[in-house]
Image (cartoon, rainbow, N blue to C red):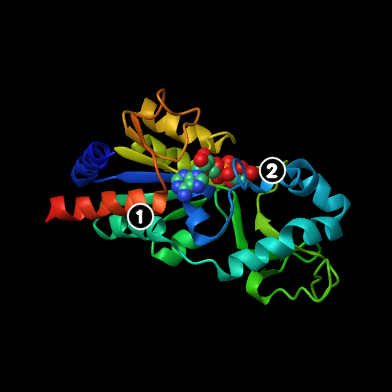
Amino acid sequence: MEELIEKAAEELARATNVAALTGAGISVESGIPPFRGPGGLWEKIDPMEYAHIDAFLKDPVKVWNVLLKDMKALLDTARPNPAHLGLAHLEAMGILKTVITQNVDGLHQLAGNTDVIEFHGTFAVHRCMDCNRRRETCDIDLDRIPPRCECGGIWRPECVFFGEMIPSRALWRSQQAAESCDVMLVIGTSATVQPAATMPAIAKQAGARIIEFNEEETPLTGWVSNYRIPGKAGNVLDRVVKRVEALRG
Ligand code: APR
């Protein structure tokens, strides 16, 4: 493990255009459960029954009661952990340029990263399904379920449900970042959902080094990733960034 941390730190200390692809695993140490694997949300509820746009349109009360209410409670209080702060530090050192995140928790922006591509949208804002006005999630009142806009329309989060398209600007900018980075950090993602999971392969194809941070192996390990550093992202990434600082002097 120590030699992998040293190797990653040396590569990052030399890099000038790093991109990161992050998934739910980077926010687990902020108290937000992952979707898959031990304690995963999809181990408890069926995503096709609660996180698909058709399910929301058919029964918004059910989706708000089973999925969205708890998500709001979690995200209202979640704070960045050392993994998020490490990526912000890499940006402050002029090493990391862009974070492509599959997460909707807004923790990268809260940690200080300024170029965050929200591949699956964001839970921080809701949109009325009738009049299209937008409102900060923290200002959505859950006294009534489903919460309704003054016009009577139902509020929905601005995240991408299953069955919906990836926002085209997010997709295009992510492909650009993947094609131009010299190193891509792939942190806390099971790399099972497309097209997000294709970004590391695009980066690899364009000549980037791919460093995976995950507690477990993924479909990228040993094939797209040059190497995987096992362990909790909050601990491991923090140690790598501290080593980069020392090498950079
Ligand atoms: N440190 C590092 N890795 C971790 C940690 C941790 N503390 N905790 C969990 N992981 C890893 C798990 O091993 C797993 O590989 O993070 C990954 C989380 O995988 P998922 O829960 O599948 O999350 P993600 O890859 O982001 O899912 C992609 O699926 O349901 C959709 O829209 C949802 O954006 C999500 C997408």
Q: Residue 175: x and y, percent?
A: 46, 38
Q: Residue 131: x and y, percent?
A: 78, 66
Where is mark 2, residue-wise?
Answer: 43
Q: Residues within 10 Å of mark 1 (few under 14, many from 20)?
A: many
Q: Residue 206: x and y, percent?
A: 35, 28
> What residue do we see at 32% from left, 54% from top?
238
Where is mark 1, residue-wise?
Answer: 87
Secondary structure beneath disc 2? Answer: helix
Task: Indicate whether 195 appears above or below 240.
Answer: above
Q: Is residue 160 left or right of residue 110?
A: right
On the rendered image, what quadrant is the N terminus found in?
top left
> What residue do we see at 31% from left, 38% from top?
183
Task: Indicate whether 80 appears above or below 120.
Answer: below
The three-letter code of the residue at mark 1 reads Leu
The three-letter code of the residue at mark 2 reads Glu
Secondary structure beneath disc 1? Answer: helix
Most distant residue in the top direction: 223
Quick check: can you spot residue 166?
no
> What residue do we see at 59% from left, 40% from top?
37
Q: Is residue 14 left or right of residue 104?
A: left
> What residue do we see at 21% from left, 50% from top?
244
Depth check, front residue: 8 or 231: 231
On the rendered image, what quadrant is the C terminus found in?
bottom left
Q: Is residue 86 left or right of residue 245?
A: right
